[in-house]
Image (cartoon, rainbow, N blue to C red):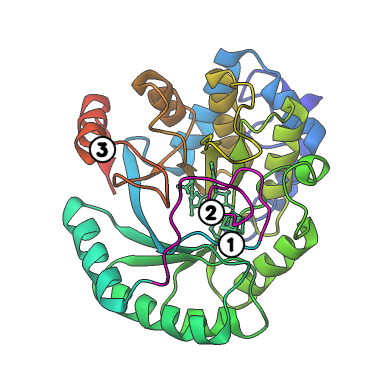
Amino acid sequence: MSNLIADPTANGIEGRPASALGKLAGTVTESLGWGAREVEALLDLPFSDLMYRAQNVHRQYHDPNAVQLSTLISVKTGGCPEDCGYCPQAARYHTAVENQEMLTLEEVVAAAAAAKAQGASRFCMGAAWRGPKQREIGKMTEMVKAVKAMGLETCATLGMLKPGQAEQLRESGLDYYNHNLDTAPEFYEEVITTRNYQDRLDTLEKVRSAGIHVCCGGIVGMGESRRARAGLIAQLASLDPYPESVPINHLVQVEGTPLHGTAALDPLEFVRTIAAARITMPKAMVRLSAGRREMSDAVQALCFLAGANSIFYGEKLLTTGNPETERDKALLNRLGLRPA
Ligand code: SAM
Ligand code: DTB
Ligand code: SF4
C-alpha cells in the first residue's frame, strides 16, 4: 500500500495516507481516513521504521519534550452493574475493591488541590456507573465547577449519558469527557455484553455535540490480536473529528476479573500501538494510561518516543496503583521531559 511504505517522506507529508492529502486544509482534527487494514500494515512495519514515522509526526505537531499530567480520582467506587471483563469495579466479579458511595464536594476539592500542588494540570473524576442519574449529575456539576475554579482543566468519566446530561456538564465547565471504545468492534463482545459499541458511539456523539472535548481510547493486552489492535486504532482515527485525547491503557490484571490470567502481551506491541495512535491521530494528545506501574522505565521511554505525550500522574488510578509521584518525577527528569 503506497501510504505504508517505510519512508515517511514518500507521500510528501509524513504520516498521512495518500488518500487523505486532499483533506489537509480542513478542521483541526479532521479524520484522515485510516482503515483497519492500513493500521495493521503500520503495526507490521519494522519497529525502527514505525518509530521513525511516529517521531516525524510527533515532532511536526507537538513539543517532543513536554508531557501533560492528569490526576484521577474515583468519586464513586465499585458496585457497577456492567460486566466489563477487565474491570475490578463490576459488582458481579469478586475482587478486593471495596464499594464507596459518592465522595463529598469537600473531599474532591481537597484531592484536586493536592493534585495541583503536585503539578497536575487536569483533574479527572471517574464513577463506577452504567451512567449517571439526574441527582448524580447535579452533584457532579458542583464538583466540576469547584475544580474548574481552582484553575485546573476538568475531565469526567461517568459512563453512558442521557440526552441533556452532556449539556449540563458543559455548562458547569467540563473540558473533557472520557468514554472509551475499549477495543475493536469484532473483539468487543468477548469483553463486554451489557452495552454495545453503538451505545458508546452514541455517548461520544452527545459529548461532541455539547461542545465538550472528547477523550476516547482503549485497552491493549486483553488477549486481542494485532488485527484487533489495528481495528481499535482505526475506529478511533475515523471518528470525525478524531478525539482530542486518546488514552491507551495496558490491561491491569486484577484478581477476580474474567481477564485475570490473560497471557502477557509483548511490551513492544504496546509501544507499536502507541505509535499507530500517534501517526493516525497527529494532533491528539496520546495518553500512556493504565499499566505504567507494571512497565519498566525503558518501555515507558519507548512509549514517549513513539509519541505518547500525556500520563496519569498520582499514586492511584481509580482503584489500582500508578507509579509513585517521586518515581515519575525522576523518570521525567532522566528523560528531560517537561510537565505541561
Ligand atoms: N464506568 C465508566 C465507564 O466505563 O465508562 C467510567 C469509568 S471506567 C473504569 C473507565 C475506563 O477505565 C474503562 O473504559 C476502561 O477503558 C478503563 N479500565 C478499567 N479497568 C481497567 C483495567 N483493569 N485495566 C486497564 N484499563 C481499565
Ligand atoms: C482511561 O482510559 N483510563 C483511566 C481513565 N480513563 C478513567 C482508568 C484506568 C483504570 C484502571 C483500573 C483501575 O484503577 O480501577
Ligand atoms: Fe462499570 Fe465502567 Fe467498570 Fe465497566 S469499566 S464495570 S462501566 S466502572
Q: Point out the frontmost of discs 3 and 1.
A: 1
User: Mark 3 near ligand 2 (CB under 8 Å)?
Assistant: no
- Check disc 1: other Cα within 10 Å, few if <14, some if 14-19, many if 20+: many
Q: Are marks 1 and 2 in contact (CB under 8 Å)?
A: yes
Judge: label 2 CB < 8 Å from ligand 3.
yes
The answer to if 98 sits in the magenta stretch is: yes
Question: Which residue is the extreme one toward the front?
Answer: 94
Give the spatial CA distance, label 2 vs label 3.
22 Å
Q: Counting other residues with Cα less than 10 Å from the Cα at mark 3, is it few (<14), some (14-19), or many (20 or more)?
A: few
* Amino acid identity at mark 1: Cys
The residue at the point 54 percent across, 67 percent down is: 158
Q: Percent x, y for residue 313?
A: 32, 46
- Give the secondary structure at mark 3: loop
Q: What are the residue bounds of the magenta stretch?
A: 82-102
In front of the other: 78 or 208: 78
Q: Amino acid at mark 2?
A: Gln
Label disc, if present, on residue 89 of the rendered structure: 2
Residue that label 1 marks: 80
Q: Is residue 3 visible?
A: no
- The reply to whether the residue tagged 1 has its Cβ within 8 angstroms of ligand 3 is yes
Which label number is shown at residue 142? none
The majority secondary structure of the magenta stretch comes to loop
Q: Is residue 188 visible?
A: yes
Residue 194 image-quadrant placement: bottom right
First in sequence: mark 2 or mark 3? 2
Residue depicted at x 19% and y 59%: 114
Cα separation between marks 1 and 2 = 6 Å
> Is 257 on the left or on the right of 187, as rendered?
left
Classify 270 as above or below 257.
above
Q: Specify the label residue 324 is tagged with.
A: 3
Camera-near label (2 vs 3) is: 2
On screen, 247 above or below 15? below
